[in-house]
């Protein structure tokens, strides 16, 4: 199961009460996939657009030392800002324009507030962030058949429909509902762990009730850090981490609601291979890069020593100068936890 599919699955589980259509969520989470499918068709148009945007060619080296020096050719004009807009509540909409403001790292991400001391048999955990919510994702070797997710929310889940049961574990009432056919997952379990802390577990029918009750019994109040696929020398002072998965991190404007969608978020991806898209060849630090426009996004892909790539997807509502974009990219490194996406 890909990171996009996992995020969709977890989003559907958390937003069950709001009942958004799966198509809407899928369009949010799979913009990157659709863009890659159109890459060959857009290559010629992107190349012509860049040629028309040539203003001046120059070279500048940032004073950060040879390891993080950035050599750039300012030939593509910065993305034009769009007019800021407010929602009816007065909160900036996801599409409101915001400029990327760099500051020294590291990247800070909220931890999952509890640690399970018992395993779910046959499942391997990864601590992720899904639309601002720390989440433990469990996956088995069956490619998505055997799975579970654990998340923490401030309010009790509502609107669960199905055959319900309840159990007492550690003095807490644990609710269990078998979901009807067609739902995401075969069951949902939830309980109150602390003040404004409701833990929700959801997964496949291969996970038994006995295993789940043992899992609840072993929950302790020790935080678990989110596992990041990247480290950052520079971060943005006005962007907030929205989602963290093994092959990507997404950032949304600090005033935008969680889950704004790829079309409004800065996305950093770990790619299996350096792209062959037509674009302008650049140097980012000591690495080769390619810069191009695609479907309203600015794309910068940086080749890594192992021939994989770190790719930054910048939407039109997040603006940045080209030197700062290159500086940001030069400071990103993959970690041993990174899993390349195949897009």
Image (tube, rainbow, N blue to C red):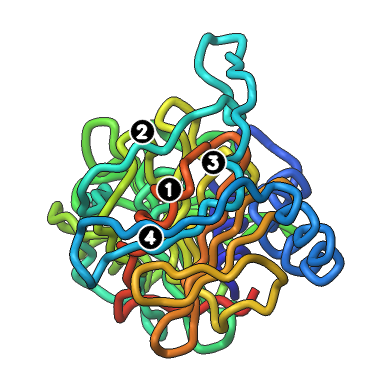
Task: Identify the mark at residue 324; answer none if there is no mark.
Answer: none
- Secondary structure beneath dot 3 equals loop
In front of the other: 278 or 131: 278
The residue under the point 52% across, 19% down is 92
- Secondary structure beneath dot 2 equals loop
The residue under the point 69% across, 37% down is 19
Distance Cα–Cα, label 3 vs label 4: 14 Å
Distance Cα–Cα, label 4 vs label 2: 21 Å
Q: Residue furthest right?
A: 41
Query: Is residue 249 shown left or right of residue 3?
Result: left
According to the picture, the residue beneath numbered tag 3 turns out to be 259
Q: Nearer the viewer, mark 3 or mark 2?
A: 2
According to the picture, the residue beneath numbered tag 2 turns out to be 238
Query: Is residue 342 shown left or right of residue 33?
Result: left
Q: Position of residue 258 (x, y in %)?
A: 49, 37
- Closer to the chain start, of discs 4 and 1, is 4
In front of the other: 101 or 191: 101
């Amino acid at each position: 199961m890909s990171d996009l599919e996992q995020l969709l699955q977890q989003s559907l589980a958390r937003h069950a009460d709001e009942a958004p259509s799966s198509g809407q969520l899928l369009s949010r989470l799979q913009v990157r996939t659709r863009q890659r499918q159109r890459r060959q068709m857009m290559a010629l148009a992107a190349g012509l657009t860049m040629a028309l945007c040539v203003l001046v060619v120059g070279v500048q080296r940032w004073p950060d030392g040879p390891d993080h020096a950035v050599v750039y050719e300012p030939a593509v004009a910065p993305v034009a800002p769009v007019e800021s807009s407010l929602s009816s509540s007065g909160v900036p909409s996801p599409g409101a324009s915001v400029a990327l403001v760099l500051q020294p790292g590291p990247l800070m991400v909220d931890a999952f507030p509890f640690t399970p001391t018992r395993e779910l048999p046959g499942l391997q955990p990864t601590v992720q962030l899904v639309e601002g919510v720390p989440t433990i994702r469990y996956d088995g070797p069956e490619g998505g058949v055997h799975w579970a997710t654990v998340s923490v929310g401030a309010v009790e889940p509502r609107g669960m429909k199905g055959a319900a049961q309840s159990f007492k574990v550690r003095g807490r009432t644990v609710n269990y509902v078998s979901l009807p056919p067609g739902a995401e997952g075969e069951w949902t379990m939830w309980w109150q762990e602390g003040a404004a802390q409701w833990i929700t577990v959801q997964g496949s029918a291969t996970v038994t009730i006995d295993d789940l009750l043992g899992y609840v019994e072993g929950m302790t109040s020790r935080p678990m850090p989110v596992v990041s696929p990247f480290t950052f020398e520079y971060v943005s002072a006005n962007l907030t981490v929205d989602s963290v998965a093994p092959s990507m991190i997404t950032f949304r404007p600090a005033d935008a609601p969680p889950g704004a969608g790829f079309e409004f978020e800065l996305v950093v991806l770990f790619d299996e291979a350096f792209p062959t898209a037509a674009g302008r060849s650049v140097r980012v630090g000591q690495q080769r890069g390619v810069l191009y426009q695609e479907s309203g996004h600015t794309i910068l892909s940086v080749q890594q020593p192992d021939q994989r790539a770190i790719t930054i997807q910048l939407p039109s509502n997040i603006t940045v100068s080209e030197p700062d974009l290159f500086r940001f990219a030069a400071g990103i490194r993959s970690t041993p936890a990174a899993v390349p996406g195949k897009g």
